[in-house]
């Protein structure tokens, strides 16, 4: 999935979004998580763990909102702050998702 985001100079550029994958890949300096690939641990947790499902849903909602914000031609200060805040929250959730997946892998 591709979306528009800002680079360091605050210009709008195309970049890869985060998608879920058990093992991260590096592409263009960013980690990519791929929800489209089959991952037995992720699939099992989605089926059995309500907390995991909620985290995945939050991550997807944050990604959707970031895509909306990226589509703004001239974002205001509140929107820029929201974008920054969402990115941080999304990263924290991704870390929680990976921790749950790792714990599950070790215990099964």
Image (tube, rainbow, N blue to C red):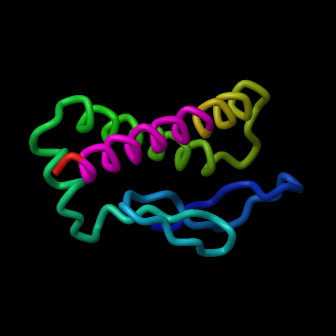
- Residue drawn at x 71%, y 49% as measured from the top left: 73
Q: Is residue 26 left or right of residue 99?
A: right
Q: Is residue 9 above or below residue 48?
A: below
Q: Is residue 77 above or below residue 103?
A: above
Q: Main secondary structure of the magenta part?
A: helix
User: How far across and down, in percent of the image, does residue 7 sit?
Assistant: 79, 58
Q: Which sits in the foreground, 82 or 42? A: 42
User: How far across and down, in percent of the image, does residue 21 sit?
Assistant: 37, 62
User: How far across and down, in percent of the image, does residue 45 sit?
Assistant: 18, 45
Image quarter in which the N terminus is found: bottom left
User: How far across and down, in percent of the image, does residue 2 sit?
Assistant: 52, 67
Q: Is residue 33 left or right of residue 50?
A: right
Quarter of the image where one finds residue 88: top right
Q: Is residue 89 magenta?
A: yes
- Residue drawn at x 75%, y 59% as measured from the top left: 12
Q: Is residue 5 above or below residue 81?
A: below
Q: In this view, which residue lies farthest toward the top? A: 78
Q: In this view, which residue lies farthest toward the bottom? A: 27
Q: Which sits in the foreground, 48 or 99? A: 99
Q: Is residue 32 left or right of residue 21?
A: right
Quarter of the image where one finds residue 31: bottom right
- Residue drawn at x 10%, y 44% as measured from the top left: 47
Q: Is residue 39 magenta?
A: no
- Residue drawn at x 26%, y 37% as measured from the top left: 52
Quarter of the image where one finds residue 82: top right
How many numbered circles are shown?
0
**Residue range highlighted in magenta:** 88-106
């Amino acid at each position: 999935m591709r979306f528009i985001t800002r680079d360091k100079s605050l210009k709008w550029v195309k970049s890869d979004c985060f998608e879920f994958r058990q093992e991260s890949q590096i592409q263009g300096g960013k980690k990519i998580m791929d929800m489209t690939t089959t991952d037995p641990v992720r699939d099992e947790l989605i089926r059995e763990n309500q907390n995991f499902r909620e985290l995945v849903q939050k991550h997807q909602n944050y990604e959707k909102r970031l895509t909306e914000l990226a589509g703004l031609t001239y974002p205001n200060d509140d929107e820029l702050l929201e974008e920054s805040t969402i990115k941080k929250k999304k990263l924290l959730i991704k870390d929680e998702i990976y921790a749950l997946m790792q714990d599950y892998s070790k215990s099964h």
